Amino acid sequence: ELAPLHAEFPHLSLSVNVSPGQVKVARLEMLVPELLSRFKLPARVLALEVTESVLIDAAESVVDRLKTIQALGVGLVLD
């Protein structure tokens, strides 16, 4: 479990690479909070890494999805 590790190292963050295809999945903005809850992690610990091409080629729905995730407190990082 990640929760005990986070308790021992509270400033540790977790970066997850997200593929362009995964960003386009309509359920992503619902999946992220579900996973944070399941693993008992605060949103500020998580950073999603996306490639520049995701943002350059992004449809409005993708941008909205990323903004929704960011509003949860999850970081977004260009990979």
Image: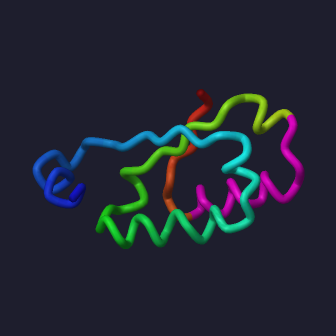
Q: How is the image coloured?
A: rainbow
Does the magenta run of residues contain 67? yes
Total marks drawn?
Answer: 0
Residue 77 in the figure: left or right of residue 61: left
Residue 61, magenta (yes or no): yes
Which image quarter: residue 66? bottom right
Q: Tell me if 67 is positioned left or right of 55 in this view.
A: left
User: Quick one: which residue is furthest to the left in this view?
Assistant: 8
Quarter of the rendering occupied by the N terminus? bottom left
- Choose top left, top right, bottom left or bottom right for residue 60: bottom right
Task: Please say if 78 is above or below 11.
Answer: above
Give the image location of residue 31, x and y in percent: 55, 67
On screen, 5 above or below 77?
below
Most distant residue in the front direction:
21
Q: Which residues are magenta?
A: 57-71
Q: Position of residue 63 (x, y in %)?
A: 78, 52
Write the residue at 42% across / 60% down.
43
Q: Which residue does the image show at 47% across and 72% down from the upper left? A: 34
Residue at 50 percent of width and 54 percent of height: 74
| Rendering coords of residue 11 (x, y %) | 24, 44
- Quarter of the image with the C terminus is top right
**Residue at (67%, 68%) from the top-left corner?**
27
Q: Along the horizontal axis of the image, is 64 left or right of 37?
A: right
Position in image of residue 44 (x %, y %) = 40, 54
Overall secondary structure of the magenta section: helix
